[in-house]
Amino acid sequence: MRTLRQASPRDAPSWPEYFEQRAAACRSPLLSRYFSSGTAAPTTPVGDVEMVALDLETTGLDPRRHAVVSVGAVPFTLDRIRLAERCYWVVQPTRPLSSKSVTLHRITHSEIAEAPDLERILPELFEVMAGRLVVVHFRHIERPFLDGAVKERLGEGIRFPVIDTMSLEARRHRLSLWARFRRWLRRPPVSIRLHDSRLRYGLPAYQGHHALLDALATAELLQAQIATHYRLETPVGELWS
C-alpha cells in the first residue's frame, strides 16, 4: 500500500521564497508591498543586514484574549542605531485595559481614549519594517500578536523571520552543557529577561515595559551579543527563527 510522505521542515520554503510567494498571493496591497520588499537570504552575513528592533506592549500575554496597546520600532545595524528614524505609537486596544496592564506599561485609559486603531498605523509600521530583519526579545509576543492583529484588520496574517535576543541568551544560559550542569547542581537558572541580559554585557538599565525603550534596549543587546559571541560574517540563518 502506498503511504503519504509527511512533510519535513526541509520542504518548507525559505524566508526569501516565502516573501516572494506572499507578495504575489496577498489580496491586501499593503501586505503585498511589505512582502515585495523581500528579506535577507539565510547566508547573508549579519554585519551586512539592515535591522529593526520591534517591541509591542499588550494588555496581557495571550494573543487570543489580549491586544496591542503600544508599538516601538528602532532601525539599526550592528554599528549604528538610527534613533532619528525611531517610531512609537500608542494604539487603542480591542480588549479592555486591566489594572495589571496599566501598572505594567503605565498607559492609562485616558491615553488610549483618542489613540488610533492599530490599522491606521500599519502603513507606517510596515514601511519601517520593509526590507529589514526584525529583532525582538521573546518572539512569542511580537510575532503572534502582530499576526493576529493584522489578520483581524486585513483578513490576512503576517509572518517574518526574527532574531530573538532572548533565544540567543537561552542558547548560552539555558541549553548549554554548563546550564545543564547548573540544573544538576540544583542551581537557579540564569535570568534571560531583557534587563538581566543587558546587565551581563555592561549595558545601562532602562525603564522597562515601554515599547520604544524596550526596542532600543533590544537593539543594543543584539549589538553586544554579536560583538561578544559571534562574528560579523555569521550568517543570519544561524541566528534567526
Image: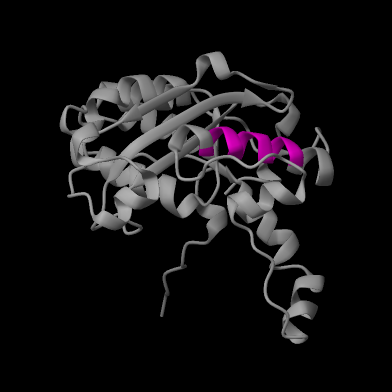
Count the marks: how many? 0
Vertical order, 26 against 69 (above or below): above
Whether residue 61 is visible to the viewer of this picture, yes or no, is: yes
Vertical order, 190 against 166 (above or below): below
Magenta segment: does it hold 59? no
Q: Position of residue 181 (x, y in %)?
A: 80, 79
Q: Quadrant of residue 87?
A: top left
- Nearest the viewer among 165 and 17 is 165
Whether residue 16 is visible to the viewer of this picture, yes or no, is: no
Q: Is residue 21 left or right of residue 16?
A: left
Q: Quarter of the image containing the N terminus?
A: bottom left
Q: Is residue 209 left or right of residue 113?
A: right
Vertical order, 84 against 153 (above or below): above
Q: Residue at x 32, y 59 (%)?
A: 62
Figure colour scheme: one colour
Q: Position of residue 229 (x, y in %)?
A: 82, 47
Q: Is residue 159 left or right of residue 9?
A: left
Q: Residue at x 27, y 42 (%)?
A: 149
Q: Position of residue 206 (x, y in %)?
A: 58, 39
Magenta region: which residues? 214-224
Q: Position of residue 53 (x, y in %)?
A: 54, 33
Q: Residue at x 25, y 32 (%)?
A: 118
- Nearest the viewer among 198 and 150 is 198
Q: Main secondary structure of the magenta part?
A: helix
